[in-house]
Image (spheres, helix red, strand yellow):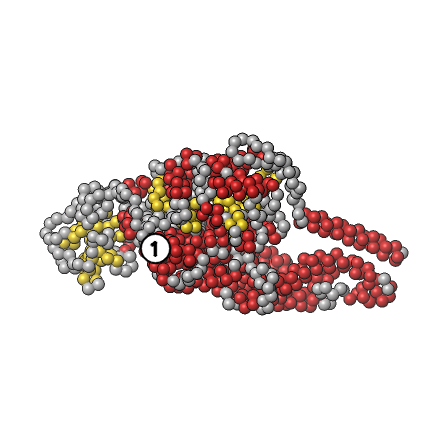
Amino acid sequence: MRSTGSRNRTHRAVATTAVLLAGAVVLTACGGGNDGNSGDRGGSSAPSGGGVRLPDLKGQTLEVAAVWTGPEQENFTKVLDAFTERTGAKVDFVPTGNNTSTFLGTRIEGGKPPDVAFLPQVGVLHQFAQKGWLKPLGAAARAQSEKNFAKGWQELGAWKGTRYGIYAKAANKSLIWYNTKAFEAAGISGTPATWKDFLSTAQTLSDSGSPAVSVGGADGWTLTDWFENVYLSQAGPEKYDRLAAHEIKWTDPSVTDALTTLAQLWGKDDLLAGGRKGALNTEFPKSVTQVFSGGAPAAMVYEGDFVTANINADTKAELGTDAKVFPFPAVGAKAPVVSGGDVAVALKGGQGAQALLTFLASADAARIWAAQGGFISPNKALDPAAYKDDVTRTIAKALVSAGDGFRFDMSDQAPAAFGGTQGIGEWKDLQDFLRDPGDVAGTQKKLEADAAKAYGSG
Amino acid sequence: MASVAHTEGAGAAPAPAPHRRARVTGTRRRWAVVFLLPALVLLGALVVYPIGYSLWRSLYDADGSGFVGLGNYADVFSDRATLTAVRNTAIWVAVAPALVTALGLVFAVLTERVRWGTAFKLVVFMPMAISMLAAGIIFRLVYEQDPAQGVANAVARSVHDTFVSSSVYPNARPNAAVSDLRASGGGSFTTKGTVRAGTPALLPLVGIAPGRLPGAPEEARAASGPGVTGTVWLDFVPGGGGTKGRIDPGERALKGVTVEAVRDGRAVASARTAADGTFTLPASADGARLRLPGADFAAPYGGIDWLGPALVTPAIIGSYVWMWAGFAMVLIAAGLAGVDRNLLEAARVDGANEWQVFRRVTVPLLAPVLTVVLVTLMINVMKVFDLVYIIAPQPSQDDANVLALQLFLSSFGGGGNYGVGSAIGVVLLVLVAPVMYVNIRRLRRERRP
């Protein structure tokens, strides 16, 4: 009696163990590489359509990760659709969220990187290349890149002499967008070319009853862009490069000057839409919409060319008539040209990723993308006629013709912990500065402490 | 159920009973091991190994290649952000569980006595069914600054506006370049010079769009006459033009603005502007300064800055209380159901009032349940992450930081420093351990016959 009972229990125990083990095996299998598209199909080149030659990738599935959402994502999807049409490969888009490097880092360490990713910061490219996570450009992609891009852009996509990335999408971040009706109502005919004029224009606008400048202070990156424009124009490109490399400290007098200049605007609640408190509660998309829609719109908003995407999608304002743009005013001798860009890199080997990079480096892809609006390419081979509107065309021409005179976004060159992460580093320190623009020295001290930490470890 | 709890409570040590029997049959111990194996494997893989690995990892640098000893711990306790996180976690542990338990107790005791008690309980418990993430998004909206969107500020504003009437010309201000009106505290503006009878004063204001003046404002008119007079008007022609500081055609009058004559800091006379912007003060105002009191220009009340640096932690604790009060209430109500009614009745018969019954009988009888709820919540609060991560906006995330969030930020939030992240994880474990110990000891004591 007793023995049978115990045997029964034994059977059950063994069965349970077996089930559990089986479960564990299944789980491991799921967790491990489940690539679906492993094994190169190796179809040789089958040119379809004009322009760049792409291999046949029928049956493959590629994954592309980038930070874009909403209208920006939709526009990019059109480019991916064209790639699918040409090669037969299915392409899935994965939004990375604001912390691109974190998202990708976890995916890579987990053994499931996307095939191609767009990195929004040069600093991240360097960091990833250093860790050996990037695959160098293949011959075809290299050829396209050399044919279509200025040397400055090619070098920005390289690390220690090896080319990794394609700057398929660039940004001109030295623009101020304004509501033409607000300017008319205030009786302002010309656009300001110097910082002094800019401030008096803002004062006039404020006197006329429209909030003068909309600042998207809830997003730290818009504030770093403000700082960079002022600094580049005031301190000059050499100092700019040295500060970007952290060769001079953030406690440098040139930084004091730049922050003091910024405080002339940020310190005046009358000039900011919603005052400082309102600015800190305004995300970037809202900073655009509150200039070009609503009953009591603000007059001006600073940001890069990508503002057009928000204007087109979220407001009824017509680019070129209701919404116009002028270059960031010169604080020092010359007006600044700060640029940014998203660099496409391959995180996985194989033909698919390289083919997509080749396509992205081509004028064909740029043409499709440009037709959507909200996009600027540093691609020399792209015919400016492809741009959707005159405003974008002018901005793009300015960027391409700047040649090597542009400077890349400083916070994008910094390690992500300093210049690319919400809630910490430069983003947070400048938000604190916007909250309390009187504290220039304290802000510099915090910036230097955070920079020293980030540059030291990264 | 009881034996399972016992095994858990006793940790990895197997129950003593099989041991004694094993000596009798000999094969029993082997079977005990087989039975325990699945649980041990899972516990080992999912609990013991990660703890051990975190300990080991916390001694290495960001890459995991260089041994740094206790360097990461030194970093943790010297970093500004982490210290804020430690302080905030302490606030959370001190405030949130106590608040939730107290509220749960009140709800549980009161719902016993109302007719619709079950329905009320259901409503209070409902937030538990919402995920932390969803609750976070809900409260992000509740605390929205704009009173048109955030319900908290909508309430704050309607309360405020009940007691303080809103101004006629919000945000209007003197045109500093052409007028001698200067801010004189409290939102008021006072002239630097004095007014003379027979010389009309010009008080130009700007900062309001001409199209958004209330009513149908008349054109401004220059005052005239022998008395102490002047004009208050909006010194802005739509479309620009005109001379600043002069009453140009097309410029609008500001009606109903109070003008005070001030001598030695005291108002000696006061008047209101007419529909054409003019005002006339009595002769006694001759030689006084003119003041425009701030009440006419106060900006509309913007509500409370819930998610600003000062209030963000209390605001998030508020949302946590909203979520967990139901949990506490249900557990305490269950405990309450087990309380012997006779004891309460006896106390009442002895002449105790309801407060005394509650304070001296109900609460002591409920003490074990209250401890369970409090300890469970303490452990829960120490690892709070999602609410803080979602509700705190970027500019004040630092001020709302808690240890679990700091752990996430330093490991995955840009820095990618798993060493420091692991160190914070270990610190968190050390902090939770005493609470766990108390809990386990109490469980064991309870099981003892």
Where residue B301 appears, as percent x and y from the top left, is: 36, 53
Position of the C terminus of chain B, as image quadrant, is bottom right
Q: Left or right: A255 with respect to B141?
A: left
Q: Is residue A410 visible?
A: yes
Q: Amino acid at mark 1?
A: Gln
Question: What residue lies at 48% left-to-right and 45% top-to-bottom?
Answer: A167
Q: Is residue B5 above or below residue A403?
A: below
User: Label 1: which residue?
Assistant: A234
Query: In the structure shown, which secondary structural element does the residue marked by tag 1 occupy?
Result: helix
Where residue B25 appears, as percent x and y from the top left, is: 87, 64
Position of the N terminus of chain B, as image quadrant, is bottom right
In the image, farthest residue toward the right: A1
Q: Residues within 10 Å of mark 1 (few under 14, many from 20)?
A: many
Q: Left or right: A119 with respect to A195?
A: right
Where residue B288 appears, as percent x and y from the top left, is: 16, 59
Question: What residue lies at 55% left-to-right and 40% top-to-bottom?
Answer: A140
Q: Chain of mark 1?
A: A
